[in-house]
Amino acid sequence: MIDEVYLDMDGVLTNWDYQIDFYNARKPTGKANWDKVCKIGAKFWIDMPWLLEGHDLYLGILELQKKYNFKLGVLSAIFSNSGKRGKRYWLECNCPEINQENVIICNRSFNKVEHAKPNRLLIDDKPENCADFVGAGSNAILFTTYKEVLHKLEEKLKA
Ligand SMILES: [Mg+2]
């Protein structure tokens, strides 16, 4: 039975791509310029806009939570301390419904699987994170559209 739902941040709740371009912190290869992101510090993460689709998802999940009464948390990854601080602050301001005790911020994306449990479900935009979770005997839904994710989530919560 699934009684804990964890949300990824970048690419699910937050618009990371927007922020990277806003701060002109993309390398010609398309990858992030992490030196620049680290120099900007916590502000880079605190100012990040919602992903509009993610905001709709979040509101829908709060509705489902009333019906199915699961624990709602966040499972995100950033290696820097300023990033961890910034992400937690963003959640405090934008997702006050999430208890900070249920916020896990690991160093790297591949560390997320260390938090996989049979009663948990991860919603993430990276197929490899979802595959790792399922491979570890947990549950995952790949973030596509908020409607599709909410539908899949309700099916799993009902099961
Ligand atoms: Mg992500």
Image (tube, rainbow, N blue to C red):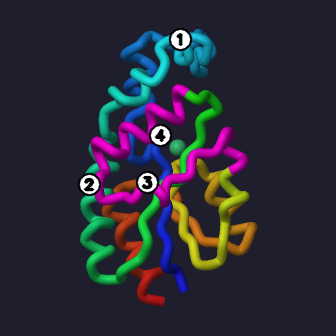
Q: Earlier in the sequence, mark 3 or mark 2?
A: 2
The amino acid pointed to by label 3 is: Gln
Residue at mark 1: 39
Tell me whether the residue at label 3 lies in contact with that at label 2, contact meaning CB atoms closer than 8 angstroms: no
The amino acid pointed to by label 1 is: Lys
Tell me whether the residue at label 2 lies in contact with that at label 4, contact meaning CB atoms closer than 8 angstroms: no
Q: Position of residue 150 (x, y in %)?
A: 35, 68
Q: Nearer the viewer, residue 52 or 104?
A: 104
Q: Earlier in the sequence, mark 4 or mark 1?
A: 4
Residue at mark 4: 10
The amino acid pointed to by label 4 is: Asp
From the viewer's perspective, is residue 108 above or below residue 141? above
116 with respect to 89 (left or right): right
Tell me whether the residue at label 4 lies in contact with that at label 3, contact meaning CB atoms closer than 8 angstroms: no
Residue at mark 2: 56
**Looking at the image, which residue sits at the far front?**
101
Of the two numbered discs 3 and 1 in the rendering, the one whose residue sits closer to the viewer: 3
Q: Secondary structure at mark 3?
A: helix
In the figure, residue 140 lies in which quadrant?
bottom right
The amino acid pointed to by label 2 is: Asp
* Residue at 52% from the left image edge and 49% from the top image edge: 125
Asked whether residue 98 is drawn in magenta, I would say yes
Q: Earlier in the sequence, mark 1 or mark 2?
A: 1
* Residue at 49% from the left image edge and 18% from the top image edge: 41
Q: Which residues are magenta?
A: 82-111
Q: Main secondary structure of the magenta part?
A: helix
Q: CA distance from mark 4 to mark 3?
A: 17 Å
Instruction: Report the disc number at residue 100.
Output: 3
From the viewer's perspective, is residue 78 above or below residue 18? below
